[in-house]
Image: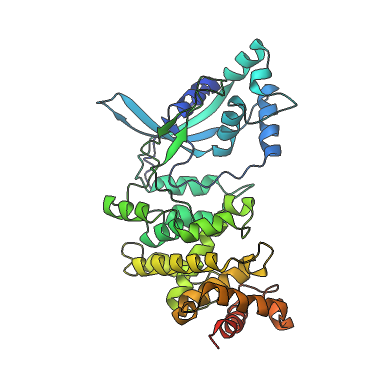
Amino acid sequence: MLNDLRYTVRSREIVDLATAMKNASLTLSPYFQRNLVWRDAHKRDFIETILKGFPFPQIFLARGPIDVENMTSSQAVVDGQQRLNAIREFIDGKLEVEGRFFRDLEPRQKEEFLKYEVAVIDFDLEAGDPRLKDVFHRLNRTYYALSAIEKLASEYSASEFMLVARALAGEILKAEPLVEELGDIGSEEGAEIIPGNMFSRDPGIGEETWTWIIERAEGPLATLLKTKAIFTPFEFDRKVPLMFALNAMCTYLTGYYNRNDRVRKFLDDKSETFAEKEEVISVLNETAEFIKAMDLPLNSMWWNKANFFTLLMELSRVPMLRNQSPADASASVAALEENLPAEYSLAAREAVNNRAQREFRAELVRDALAPQ
């Protein structure tokens, strides 16, 4: 098979890459990318590698076409996002290494850091080229390999079903994708917000669909997931709330099932047209508003992922349960929590995502919430 993927191999100084990140001609968060997952310890080890003058593996960039009218070009990081972000944070004074920030380095050390040569492979791939995702997946099979949901998020980035899930999970904001400028290299002042480049949004998403999604972004469920201790910061980094939202949507539409078994089928079946999208996003957001109004204590068991999933599903799938006041519903689940059957505790602790356990928890919650 003819290999027509064109690329060049070269080196670029860190100052060049930092400037490209600063003016958004190089984006670290293209539509197919994962979230940032490196911990500070990994970032510090990496920056130490540069400060010691040691080499590190090449980074891969996708180079889009040149805008001949504005004489600008756009690039996106395909592999090397975590490393470039560590460089940006160190320069921007957000990362301390060996007790020093970038501003604390001697002038000669700053110059050596900024002139460090990075091996770069540039692919000639436009934003909508399907090979972009393929290359991304192939390059992310090692340490911190892509999780199942990270692969799905990249593969189905233009799917209506995925877009609704991303909105419900809080991944889509009402504003267009933005990046924060670094200001002058090494300066922590004068930062400004500038638009992302052509790689920031999947070109397969129509303008009408994108407008519809943006109008429904940052809704009640997204807010609840972000403000309550349902997910850890690391789980947000690995897109766990997105899989939660996908399972909530599938369960609302078809009932309980094992683990994540129906997610891919729905992504395939409703990739182009998701007829129930208005109903799903409205009901789940209305239910989230109801749960918020229940004013559950912060230490309530209902902020546990499995228990919250059950509560969200039963209140959304059985509308009559929301006919009562949030205060009455809160009292009902509080009573259940105080007199929790041992079988429920087991179903919320072991094999929590199996269909049998999900249905068992659902039945108890449904009975507890049923108006007397």
Residue 200 position in % (x across, y down) = 40, 41
**Can residue 7 be seen in the rendering of this structure?**
no
Res. 68 image quadrant: top left
**Can residue 209 be seen in the rendering of this structure?**
yes
Residue 194 position in % (x across, y down) = 41, 32
Q: Does 105 appear above or below 25? A: above
Asked whether 339 or 73 is in front, the reply is 339
Number of disc labels: 0
Residue 182 position in % (x across, y down) = 51, 26
Q: Does 183 appear above or below 255? A: above
Q: Residue at image x 47%, y 74%?
A: 316
Q: Residue at image x 71%, y 83%?
A: 343
Residue 137 position in % (x across, y down) = 50, 49
Q: Does 258 appear above or below 9? A: below
Q: Is residue 161 left or right of residue 87?
A: left
Residue reaching furthest to the left: 69
Give the colour scheme shown. Answer: rainbow
Res. 370 image quadrant: bottom right
Q: Does 345 appear above or below 105? A: below
